[in-house]
Amino acid sequence: MYEITKKKVLANVGGARTTLMVVKAPDVARVCLPGQFVMIRVNETGERIPLTVADFDRDRGEVTIVFQEVGKTTKLLGTLEEGEFIQDFVGPLGKATPADKKYGTVVAIGGGCGSAIAYPVARAFKDAGNYLITINGARSMDFLIYRDEMKSISDEWYETTDDGSCGVHGFVTTVLADLIEKGRDIDLVFAVGPVPMMKFVAKTTESKGIHTIVSLNSIMVDGTGMCGACRVSVGGQMKFSCVDGPEFDGHQVDFDELMRRLEAYKEKEAISLEEWEKQAGGR
């Protein structure tokens, strides 16, 4: 059992809450690295879901996770309060981001909840001596998270909103394309967020030959490569996001196939959520 030591709602628009939780998990905190993830199970009858580590404190033995409450399990997780416990918290899993190297100029991009995931990776790039440009994007100002955290570690910091309510009116690729068109010398781009966002980030950099890493949020069951649910095509080969990733060369990922796979269980997920909300009395 893993105690929740802190809970904070980062955004809450139209009932779509983005929640931060700090979890007491000393064994995970002691060895986890930026880019890795954990598999959690809220209770004994719950399903397993992957959540990428948003931060960690080795001294306190704590791991931070950030999630948007959109389905049954994330909504169930969101009902837990400080002092309560998560049944299972397994990790660290997956390969860490190669962020401890000096590349030169690195652009770290986070879309929506992806900004929380991008933060520890971006911080590691900065600590390794890279010139760090960060781009935070969201549908609107109300959905922007980790603004102060990302700004504090950045040499250059940009925000974008789809509706123009804050920062640049447009997408993260609007800023990225502008930097490229201005002739900025970019050595590496790291992007995490909605799959369509990562797809178009990769398309923006591909023609310029800028190495681009994306973090994939595939469907996972066990997180150890045994079930095959998280398979994704990379460079024409089948890979497992949980053990071969979750990060891959964005120019090699078959994003269209990934999006189809993510849609495969939408109907069943909606039914599961509806049944849970009826039992829970709604929220």
Image (cartoon, rainbow, N blue to C red):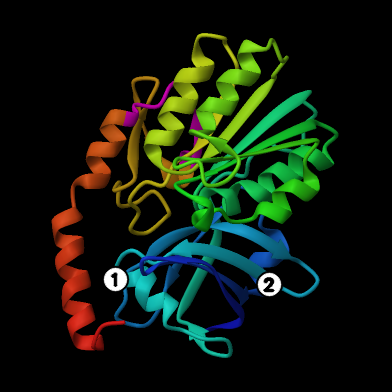
Q: Is residue 259 above or below residue 91?
A: above
Q: Is residue 270 magenta?
A: no
State the extent of the magenta-drawn residues as a range.
244-255
Can residue 278 be spotted in the picture? yes
Residue closest to the eye, 173 or 211: 173
Q: Amino acid at mark 1?
A: Lys
Q: CA distance from mark 1 to mark 2?
A: 25 Å
Residue closest to the eye, 50 or 95: 50
Q: Is residue 265 above or below residue 281?
A: above
Left or right: residue 8 compared with residue 269: right
Left or right: residue 100 compared with residue 6: right
Residue at position x 62%, y 66% in the image: 64
Q: Is residue 245 magenta?
A: yes
Give the quadrant of the C terminus. Answer: bottom left
Q: Is residue 192 above or below residue 8?
A: above
Residue at position x 47%, y 44% in the image: 243
Occupied quadrant, residue 13 = bottom left
Residue at position x 63%, y 40% in the image: 97
Q: Which residue is the site of mark 1? A: 72
Occupied quadrant, residue 257 = top left
Count of labels in the image: 2
Residue closest to the eye, 193 or 230: 193
Q: Which residue is the site of mark 2? A: 62
Q: Position of residue 225 (x, y in %)?
A: 39, 48
Q: Are circles 1 and 2 on residues that touch, CB within 8 Å?
A: no
Q: Amino acid at mark 2?
A: Glu
Q: What is the residue that sits farthest to the front in this orientation?
A: 165
Q: Position of residue 17 (x, y in %)?
A: 43, 68
Eye-nearest disc, 1 or 2: 1
